[in-house]
Image: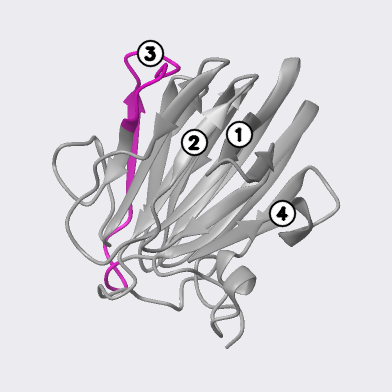
Amino acid sequence: MLQKISTNDFRGNGPIKALYPGLVVGNGDTGLGSIGRIDHASFHGRHHIAMHPHVNDEILSYFRSGSVHHRDSEGFAETINTNRLMLMKAGKLFQHEEDVDGTKAPHEGLQIFIRPGVKDLKPEVIFHDLDKIYSDNEWRLVASPGKDTAFQFSSQTWIYDVRLSAGKDFKLPVLPAGDLTLLLYVFQGEINVNDNLPLHKQEGLIINKEDTAIHTSKGAELVLFVTNEHAPIFKDGMYSGNQLR
């Protein structure tokens, strides 16, 4: 199965556009397995996002320009940016606020809401510096359920990224074993999948048991979300949970 995600599938008219991937496939769930929600944010100038709660959400902050100063109820105060990322694992209750700085360059990035494997885990905040901002022409595993990444989800979820050069032919990475569903997202640029499916910035593709070949004429930045839809998850998180209930 190949199911295209278009810019019209995002909700919101402000600087944050929210994608509920389950609505694209119409599965009675706003999420797609453990992938609850993906926010594509783009801010110009300075903005303050007041203290607000999360419950049973695991949120990866993946920023590609600008920076954010983060403060939370666990006592952390850190600045996150293009090479310093953050995973917030909100269990019973977690609160944070953010000061966004998009003055030197527009602040743009993803807030990725992943469903936990079980509910009410102990809150935890993890910061990690990438070795380099971009992974050129090679898939990079950013987060996973295992100890091979600094960011570890409690559910069966993997996130990869790559920056492709113009004129590049490319394939998906070698994935873990299992019945996996993929969401391929174009963060910047444009690609063509299987020679007949063009995807542009803020578009994507849900892939299940399909071979895919990727080509980009002008270059692209891609993020790949992988989930095992049959693995245990908690679907009632504040933001990651099923909003149709």
Task: State how far apart marks 2 and 1 are (Cα).
Answer: 7 Å
Residue type at the position of mark 1: Ile
The answer to whether residue 197 is above or below residue 178 is above
Residue type at the position of mark 4: Ser
Q: Residues within 10 Å of mark 3 (few under 14, many from 20)?
A: few
Q: Which residue is mark 4?
A: 6
- Frontmost residue, 163 versus 145: 163
Task: State how far apart marks 3 and 2 are (Cα).
Answer: 24 Å
181 horizontally vs 179: left or right: right
Q: Which residue is mark 1?
A: 191
x%, y% of residue 222? 51, 34
x%, y% of residue 83? 44, 19
Q: Select label 4 or label 3 by which is in front.
A: 4
- Along the polypeptide, which appears first: circle 4 or circle 3? 4
The residue under the point 46% across, 71% down is: 237
Magenta stretch contains residue 135: yes
Q: Which residue is mark 3?
A: 132
x%, y% of residue 156? 26, 60
Q: Residues within 10 Å of mark 1 (few under 14, many from 20)?
A: many
| SS for callout 3 | loop
- Along the polypeptide, which appears first: circle 4 or circle 2? 4
Q: Which residue is mark 2?
A: 214
130 horizontally vs 150: left or right: right
